[in-house]
Image (spheres, rainbow, N blue to C red):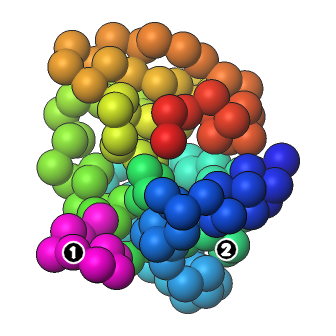
Amino acid sequence: MIEEIVNELSKNEYFKNEIIGKPATDDDLKLCIKRLTEMGFKIFSNEYEDFLKKYNGFYPFFGTKKIKAPHSDYIHNDIISANEEYKDKFEDCVLIGKGEDYYVYNIIKKHYEIRDRYCYDVNEKFDTFELLFKNIKL
């Protein structure tokens, strides 16, 4: 389903130049997981790893590296920098994206959440990354 959504979006003129990083390598993922573990996150979602292997940094989701937007000075954050910045806001969660809301993986409850951009409350919960992806506002 994710691939179908990305393919459909890529046909749209608005999303044609959207930020999509090069697929994450095994080394990229190992380093990312190591850094997240050092920050206190013991678990990382296999679903999100699979996503990064195809779409490493597809806006609004963070990839393993910072990515410069194709036609502006905007730099899309990487997952490590984002979690360093917001570490105190999301207890027991890995921040995986930021758009109109925050997108997190709750490592204790093992589900994905959409959190309010201003008060950080949970707006919606999803059992899979695919369902989260389908329900975000692009």
Which residue does the image show at 57% across and 51% down from the upper left? 44
Q: Mark 1 touching mark 2, by CB under 8 A?
A: no
Boundaries of the magenta span: 66-76
- Residue 118, given in percent of the width and then of the height, sits at 19, 19
Q: Residues within 10 Å of mark 2 (few under 14, many from 20)?
A: some
* Mark 1 and mark 2: Cα distance apart in space: 25 Å
- Residue 55, given in percent of the width and then of the height, sits at 61, 69
Of residue 20 and residue 129, the one placed in the foreground of this image is 20
- Asked if the stretch drawn in magenta spans residue 92, the answer is no
Q: Amino acid at mark 2?
A: Lys
Of residue 20 and residue 127, the one placed in the foreground of this image is 20
Q: Amino acid at mark 1?
A: Ser
Secondary structure at numbered mark 1 = loop
Secondary structure at numbered mark 2 = helix
Residue 53 numbered mark, or none = 2
- Asked if the stretch drawn in magenta spans residue 74, the answer is yes
Which residue does the image show at 42% across and 13% down from the upper left? 122
The answer to whether residue 51 shows anywhere in this view is no
Q: Quadrant of residue 112?
A: top right
The answer to whether residue 80 is above or below residue 67 is above
Q: Which residue is mark 1?
A: 72
